[in-house]
Image (cartoon, grey):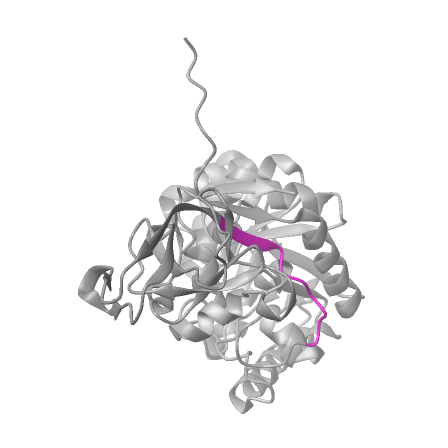
Amino acid sequence: MQIIPPPRRVWVEVNLTTLRANYRKIATAVAPARVMAVLKANAYGLGAEPIARALVHTGVERFGVAEPYEALALAPLGLPVQILGSVLPEELPALVAAGIILPVTDLATAHAIQAEAEQQSRRVTVHCKIDTGMGRLGILIAEARDVIRQTVRLPNLDVEGIYSHFPVAYRAGEAYTQQQIERFLELLNDLTAAGIAIPLRHMANSDAINNFPHTARSPFNLVRTGINLHGSFDTEGRRVLNLEPVLALKTRLTAVRRLPAGTAIGYGLTHRLPRETAVGTISAGYADGLPLALSNRGYVLIRGIPCPILGRISMDYTTVALDQLPEATVGDEAICLGGEGPHGITVEDWANLKGTHPYEIICAIGTRVERRYL
């Protein structure tokens, strides 16, 4: 007998129509600059391949990722795929064979890519990554002119792009970010004076598109956007683009009970009921992405009514008050993230409660949570 599994208890809905609309708004805002959709970490956990396929039909020109397996998964879609971070020597054979755009983060990496390209009798497209102040990866700005001059001489490399990254672009008007931009522009001028013209020049990430819009203007001609595609923003900075959230995290009520006054709720006994209370338990906890910081602070929406979280969130379950919803029944849908109107719960709401940023909230949605694409 074939066993048909029951529906998942927790799921995240990803609205691809909203995703495509967000992409079009971003592309319009930065035109004539082109847009790279950054889908690293499985599109921040929402599913890189379904999202990539939706964007292909919306006119996206290329994808950015963090590491080889992400790149190789998207290569069959037929658009340029670029690794934005770094590459290791043992990764080069597969990446060169697949035609992935590779980062040059130092001269040794450039020579390693050249050697593998020569071995395979291929040409490899590369972008030179410049460290203008992130302090993480890339050619130091003071060494960049010399490294790039040597890189462009390597016969099997096509230096298509040059780029850098911002650590604090979410702070509008930040002097540090402006200094990074000025250093990068000085480097471009030095390269031009040396007769080196690099076609694609990019610094703008999602934050910079909103807070430093001149990084989408000449001489820049490419921007990178990830979290803005999902309709989320850093909790600091401006929100110039009118984007909509694409995701909703949902579960169901698994129990409805009336508990007497004095009942302790959850691990640590952090909440005691002051009176007899209608209490519900939903089938989602921190393993599904609900931050512990919501304990005794947040709420979920059931039938559009905010139901406060009682006690500490568990790994698999969360207890909520149902006094405002006496008609609630087992099986009712509970919205943990999403919803309409003034009580809608956003990724930024959770980030503020947790004292973190929206990227962590989205990436923390658990692996057992079903991804459903609308």
Foreground residue, 309 or 24? 309
Residue drawn at (67%, 53%) of the image: 19
Farthest residue, direction top: 1
Q: Main secondary structure of the magenta part?
A: loop
Mark count: 0
Question: Does the magenta segment cover residue 361?
Answer: no
Q: Residue at x 72, y 70 (%)?
A: 242
Where is residue 204? Give x, y as percent: 62, 71
Residue that lies at the very extreme toward the left in this rendered image: 268
Above or below, 30 against 316 in this view is: below
Asked which quadrant contains residue 152, the reply is bottom right
As rendered, which of 212 and 139 lies closer to the eye?
212
Q: Position of residue 361 (x, y in %)?
A: 45, 62
Residue at x-position 67% and y-position 47%: 16
Q: Nearer the viewer, residue 134 or 40?
A: 40
Q: Which residues are magenta?
A: 240-250
